[in-house]
Image: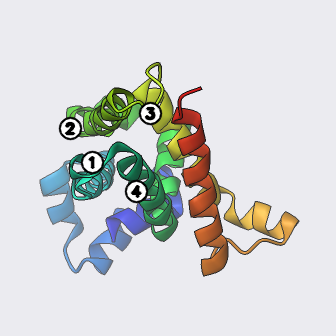
């Protein structure tokens, strides 16, 4: 409930009273465990990022050939982001706040190191097999995957209305998932 409250109303607009009521606890207990509304917000962010990284670790990408591993990572990221629009909203709110709470959380920074570690492994294996270029920065590739995937979430209403595209249509989502996968695979391919 706290995740939804912060995603819907932002840090400043979220109400601890509302969170307490929806979670059937007291405001006092929330402050006891998290010390402040900002402490609860930081815990929500930590949990969201932990969920993302856990999902990636659970994909078993290290057991797949590099091309299949990368495509699976990209396509599962599109599906994951699409099914959790609150993720984008929380990230956008944190960016509005200049990343203040992410900077103050060592667990977010520690947990998110795995994003580039996973990509580094896939890219290394692909370069060794001759199917990927050797000059790809894993952080840059992570940014590209995130940007393409999150665009569908962050712009679903405006882009969808302006161009008449229903991003929630399963056929559109499948087409976009494949297209984003194709873009990434072409980018990493040897030149």
Q: Quadrant of residue 59?
A: bottom left
x and y, in percent, of residue 125 in the image: 30, 33
Which sits earlier in the primary sequence, circle 4 or circle 1?
Answer: 1
Task: Looking at the picture, tell me which residue is in the foreground, 75 or 107.
Answer: 75
Disc 2 designates what residue? 107
Which sits earlier in the primary sequence, circle 2 or circle 4?
Answer: 4
Give the distance between the C-alpha atoms of the residues marked 4 and 1, in whole angstroms: 25 Å
Whether tag 2 and tag 1 are in contact, CB under 8 A, the answer is yes
Whether tag 3 and tag 1 are in contact, CB under 8 A, the answer is no
| Disc on res. 99 | 3
Secondary structure type for disc 1: helix
Please report the residue visible at 19 percent of the width from the left and 75 percent of the height from the top.
25
Q: Is residue 68 above or below residue 165?
A: above
Which sits earlier in the primary sequence, circle 3 or circle 1?
Answer: 1
For label 3, the crowd category at 10 Å Cα-Cα, with few meaning under 14, some 14 to 19 and many 20 or more, is few
Please report the residue visible at 25 percent of the width from the left and 38 percent of the height from the top.
114
x and y, in percent, of residue 61 in the image: 27, 51
Q: Is residue 12 above or below residue 17?
A: above
Disc 1 designates what residue? 46
Which sits earlier in the primary sequence, circle 4 or circle 3?
Answer: 4
* Colouring scheme applied when the structure was drawn: rainbow
Which is in the foreground here, disc 4 or disc 1? 4
Which is in the foreground here, disc 4 or disc 3? 4
On screen, residue 135 versus residue 50, left or right, reads right
| Disc on res. 72 | 4
On screen, residue 115 versus residue 88, left or right, reads left
On screen, residue 177 versus residue 55, left or right, reads right
């Amino acid at each position: 409930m706290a995740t939804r409250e912060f995603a819907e109303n932002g840090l400043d607009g979220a109400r601890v009273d509302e969170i307490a009521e929806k979670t059937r606890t007291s405001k006092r207990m929330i402050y006891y465990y998290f010390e402040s509304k900002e402490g609860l917000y930081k815990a929500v962010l930590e949990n969201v990022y932990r969920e993302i990284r856990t999902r990636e670790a659970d994909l078993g990408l290290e057991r797949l050939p590099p091309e299949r591993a990368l495509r699976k990572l990209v396509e599962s990221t599109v599906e994951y982001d699409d099914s959790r629009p609150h993720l984008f909203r929380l990230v956008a709110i944190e960016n509005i706040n200049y990343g203040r709470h992410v900077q103050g959380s060592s667990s977010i920074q520690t947990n998110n190191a795995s994003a580039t570690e996973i990509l580094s492994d896939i890219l290394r294996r692909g370069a060794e097999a001759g199917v990927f270029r050797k000059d790809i920065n894993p952080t840059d590739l992570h940014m590209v995957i995130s940007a393409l995937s999150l665009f569908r979430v962050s712009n679903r209403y405006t882009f969808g209305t302006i161009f008449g595209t229903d991003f929630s249509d399963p056929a559109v989502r499948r087409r976009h998932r494949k297209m984003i996968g194709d873009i990434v695979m072409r980018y990493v391919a040897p030149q």
